[in-house]
Image (spheres, rainbow, N blue to C red):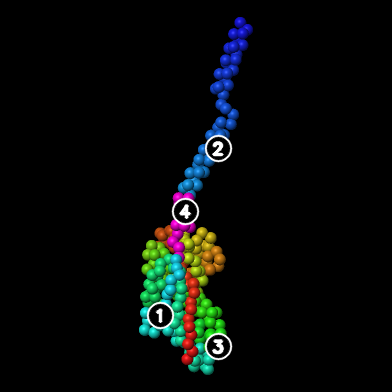
Amino acid sequence: MAEEDNNEAAEQGANEEAKAPKKGGKAVKLLGGLVALMATGSVLAMMAIPSKADQPRMTGPFEFKFFELDDNPNVVTNTRDDNFSRYVKFEPTTTVFAYDEAYPSTRRAETGFLTAMRNAMSRIVVKYELDHIFENSDVFNEELRQAAEPILFPVCFGDASSSFMADPESGLMPGDSQETSGTFRGDFYENVIQIDGARGTLQINADGLVQSFNGDERNLMVEDRNGKVIFVDVTGVDETYTGSIQIGVKGRIRRLTATFTAQ
């Protein structure tokens, strides 16, 4: 009888042990669920954010001559010698990198391009005497490059058909001082400007200074996180528009060379 009671007690204990939840079982399942959720989130995040490899990249170098289609391919400009009675003649040639090899030629065909380029180079030459130009030709060519690059590769706004037109989606366009005073020179496909028409704010990328606007500004300054600025015209921005557009330059002049002839 005692033996039967012991057997019943043992069997009852085994049944109770089987029914009892295993210690830590819920924690293991919860941890597994969190890991799976995190893995799913990581996959979705990678799908939502384009990688650097997916962005267009500038290619080159390509050779480009500013005035080769003009009747006179040379720049002829006075120097400071003899009360500005002397002058130099040169034909500048550049090597460029760009998202599109055809872009410089398209830019050259825009209204006012050739005049703006000649004037920019002439303003550099007229500051110096001939001796300075010939004795420091490499330095002088670099100064010409810096003057020419913003004209050949201005900051572009979204899908605007030219450098001085508005982006058709947002209505944002360059301001009055952009050509002469804008200092922002980021690559086009690596930068955006965020526009919130309802709140009346602009911001370059996610870390630039937030700039408020009323809607009637034609020359509003917007600053990025490094203190570089653009000037914009917001009169065409609809108050219902909220989004971001690409902004920046579509190429760079790697090198400019010019052989000078004194007259």
Q: Give the residue pinned by disc 2.
A: 31
Alpha carbon separation for disc pair 4 and 2: 27 Å
* N-terminal label among 4 and 3: 4
Q: Give the residue pinned by disc 3.
A: 131
Alpha carbon separation for disc pair 1 and 3: 26 Å
Amino acid identity at mark 2: Leu
Q: Which residues are magenta?
A: 46-58
Mark 1: secondary structure: loop
Alpha carbon separation for disc pair 1 and 2: 68 Å
Which tag is nearer the camera, tag 4 or tag 3?
3
Alpha carbon separation for disc pair 4 and 3: 55 Å
* N-terminal label among 4 and 2: 2
Q: Position of residue 214 (x, y in %)?
A: 46, 65
* N-terminal label among 4 and 1: 4
Amino acid identity at mark 3: Asp
Q: Is residue 18 above or below residue 263?
A: above
